[in-house]
Amino acid sequence: MSVSKASVELPILDISQPLSPSSLSLLADACRKWGFFHIKNHGISKDIYNKLHSFSNEIFSLPSETKLKIGPLSSLNTYTPHFIASPFFETLRVSGPNFLASAQSSADFLFNQKSPHQFSEILQDYGDKMTELSRKIIKNILMSLGEGFDTTYHESHFKNCHGYLRINNYTPPETLGEDEEPEGLGMHTDMSCVTIVYQDQTGGLQVKSSAGDWVDIAPCDESESEALVVNIGDLLQAWSNDKLRSSEHRVVLRRPAINRFSIAFFWGFEDEKVVSAPEEVVGDGGKKLYKPFVCSDYLKFRENDERGKFEKVGFTVRDFAGNAITKDFEEK
Ligand SMILES: O=C(O)CCC(=O)C(=O)O
Ligand SMILES: [Fe+2]
């Protein structure tokens, strides 16, 4: 196992403003080289994260048998317990666009109460904000990809995108040697167009460089609120004909062995969308690197056959729809 040596320097984009040409070019570089960047001034306060964290802790602290009421064998299936993705990882899924109803149905099962729960209301607000941010992000990414691409493709290709949230709790083993870095979440790529991640100050998120080394994506404190991590997912990599990189990433656990909390928002195409790079995006003389595919067929490919198992770790859109000529990403 290679141990990370460095922390990658990613641009921190001010998402509340139209991006200047120089910021767009930083964005384009980051998307090509790492598929990761940060955003600030995203409109979500530390207070919201503190509330989400403490509500989530309440849920994750419940006895396992209670949590399993919404586990993989239940009708709801919104909770993934330990020992599925890893021994140290559990996660709660909240589906959009009605985040409130989704969170509330989990809460009702867990707490046997029907009254509106502040947790669900905050999650609705959070999900709405993430959806809005994703639209802004994709607009900027399209602008960074080519002149006028945002007006050509934003509405026509990304209008029906939708998203869901995953609230993640990492519990490291109690005894952890100095050099031990167990994987809390194994290497994978995201199936989304874009993913927006809040990570707490614990650290441990890593991206694989094109040279094959793991490098840290350090938590980034922007005083008023943490900067959020954004990464490109497989759907956008395929749509952009590899102009945008969906990088392999993972989460490792380190000493001091404290719980790590993160919230990921995955925003992607509607199930029935046929994903195929537009000619103009492929560019003159370029070859299409992927066969057109139906979005939901790819999502199914990534799910394990066994009910309740986590998405296959390690398989990507290249394995699914890549032509043999798919190129490797260069570190420029
Ligand atoms: O917990 C994190 O920081 C990242 C989680 C992640 O990569 C995922 O849920 O896909
Ligand atoms: Fe991920």
Image (cartoon, grey):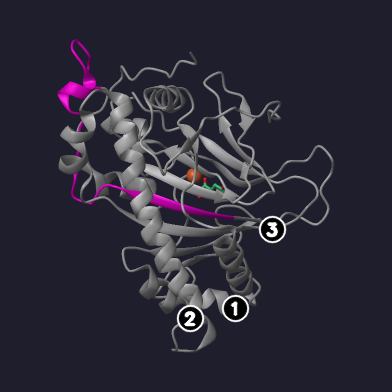
Q: Nearer the viewer, residue 28 or 195?
A: 28
Which residue appears at 62% of the width and 70% of the height?
Answer: 60
- Give the percent coordinates (x, y) of residue 62: 63, 77
Classify residue 141 by image quadrant: top left
Question: Which residue is label 2 attached to?
Answer: 117
Q: Which residues are magenta?
A: 262-288
Q: Nearer the viewer, residue 77 or 108?
A: 108
Between the C-alphas of marks 2 and 1, the distance is 22 Å
Residue at the outermost top position: 285
Question: Which residue is label 1 attached to?
Answer: 65
Are the residues flagged by discs 3 and 2 in contact, CB closer than 8 Å? no
Q: Secondary structure at mark 2?
A: loop
Query: In the image, what residue type sits under mark 3?
Result: Thr
**Direction from residue 200 to residue 265 in the image, left or right:** left
Q: Nearer the viewer, residue 20 or 89?
A: 20
| Label 3 vs 2, first from the N-terminus | 2
> Disc 3 or disc 1, which is closer to the eye?
3
| Label 3 vs 1, first from the N-terminus | 1
Q: Is residue 164 visible?
A: yes
Are the residues flagged by discs 3 and 1 in contact, CB closer than 8 Å? no
Between the C-alphas of marks 3 and 1, the distance is 18 Å
Q: Secondary structure at mark 1?
A: helix
Which residue appears at 30% of the width and 25% of the height?
Answer: 145
- Please say if 92 is above or below 5: below
Which residue appears at 59% of the width and 63% of the height?
Answer: 47
On whether residue 263 falls in the magenta region, the answer is yes
**Direction from residue 282 to residue 13 in the image, left or right:** right
Query: In the image, what residue type sits under mark 1?
Result: Glu
Disc 3 under 8 Å from ligand 1? The reply is no
Question: Which residue is label 3 attached to?
Answer: 171
| Label 2 vs 1, first from the N-terminus | 1
Q: Residues within 10 Å of mark 2 (few under 14, many from 20)?
A: some
